[in-house]
Image (cartoon, rainbow, N blue to C red):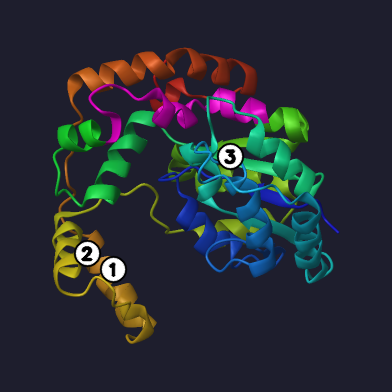
């Protein structure tokens, strides 16, 4: 069997597009994660991340033998010649990471899955936080209110440290081996699908031409539009628990989604003092990432 792949996120960094357009549809990938997780693989992974919860009251007991058996059962259902791939953004949540580069989850995953390749997709940290703001608030709070609520008025480094990508990547390199960790940039995917797909597919061991076809014409880190924001507020008001995808033909849903995405983009400006503090906070880590992993962060304006 091909070496399994874990795609560990990050949020708002193209994960959903990769999961839906590539991982779930590529003929050489056996998708065990999002959008429809294999239940045994998910159960094994969930116990691993819950056993690393920062809150002792929420932390679960790590059941290694059980988790390892569940993972092997999931692999046993993979068709010969396909690459098993598990993708889940939850693996990068700050709740499971006590500090930048916390080794707890990477090493527990290594114990559960054995040798594997790790895919990490980064995004400019400030733009990622801007995107998180709208996904979490639908614009019902100002950026200042949201940041105050999340951080109690100061840059809560316990919440934002997961986006110190160099420290994060090094923790996985220590657990799985540096040669088995690949770091990819959302900005590269948006700028040059062919180049991104070639590099990603070479790393995980599947056909790149098929990946390019699947990823063409996808949208990456597009901002929510005023239409989309208005619709989200309306949904929340009148039908928060109704999933229209169960009742409406897919073609109609796709058309409506396209209509929402063509509206005027929302402009968001984080407080200037926050931007300055985040630039300062991520600068040294980004410099190490560019140096040690050979990534063109300067080209895409990452804090350096």
Can you tell which mark lies on residue 260?
Answer: 2
Of tags 1 and 3, the one toward the viewer is 3
In space, the residues marked 2 and 3 are separated at their CA atoms by 29 Å
User: Whole-percent x and y of residue 142?
Assistant: 13, 39
Q: Which residues are magenta?
A: 150-171
Q: Nearer the viewer, residue 261 or 111?
A: 111
Judging by the rendered image, the residue that carries numbered circle 3 is 120
Q: Place residue 292 in its image quadrant.
A: top right
Q: Is residue 159 magenta?
A: yes
Inter-mark Cα distance, 1 to 3: 28 Å
- Residue where numbered disc 1 is placed: 257
Residue placed most toward the observer, 289 or 190: 289
- Mark before the other along the chain sequence, 2 or 3: 3
Determine whether label 1 and label 2 are within 8 Å by CB.
yes
Front residue (pair 260, 76): 76
Element type at mark 1: helix
**Left or right of 136, for residue 14:** right
Helix, strand or loop status at disc 3:
strand
Tell me which label, 1 or 3, sits earlier in the chain.
3
């Amino acid at each position: 069997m091909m070496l399994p792949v874990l795609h560990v996120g990050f949020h708002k960094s193209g994960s959903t597009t990769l999961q839906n357009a590539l991982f779930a549809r590529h003929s050489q990938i056996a998708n065990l994660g999002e959008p429809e997780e294999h239940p045994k693989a998910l159960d094994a992974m969930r116990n691993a991340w819950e056993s690393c919860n920062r809150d002792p009251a929420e932390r679960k007991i790590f059941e290694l033998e059980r988790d390892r058996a569940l993972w092997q059962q999931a692999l046993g259902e993979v068709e010969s010649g396909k690459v098993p791939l598990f993708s889940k953004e939850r693996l990068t949540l700050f709740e499971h990471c006590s500090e930048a580069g916390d080794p707890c989850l990477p090493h527990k995953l290594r114990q559960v899955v054995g040798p594997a390749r790790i895919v990490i997709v980064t995004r400019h940290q400030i733009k990622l936080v801007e995107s998180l703001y709208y996904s979490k608030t639908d614009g019902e709070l100002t950026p200042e209110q949201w940041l105050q609520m999340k951080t109690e008025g100061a840059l809560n480094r316990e919440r934002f440290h997961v986006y110190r990508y160099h420290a994060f990547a090094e923790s996985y390199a220590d657990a799985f081996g540096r040669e088995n960790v690949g770091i990819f940039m959302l900005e590269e995917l948006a700028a040059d699908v062919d180049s991104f797909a070639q590099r990603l597919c070479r790393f995980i061991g599947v056909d790149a031409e098929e990946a390019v076809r699947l990823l063409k014409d996808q949208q990456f880190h597009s901002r929510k539009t005023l239409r989309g924001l208005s619709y989200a507020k309306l949904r929340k008001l009148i039908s928060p628990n109704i999933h229209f995808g169960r009742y409406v033909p897919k073609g109609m849903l796709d058309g409506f989604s396209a209509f929402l995405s063509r509206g005027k983009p929302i402009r968001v400006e984080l407080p200037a003092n926050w931007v300055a503090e985040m630039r300062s906070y991520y600068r040294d880590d980004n410099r190490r990432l560019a140096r040690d992993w050979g990534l063109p962060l300067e080209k895409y304006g990452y804090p350096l």
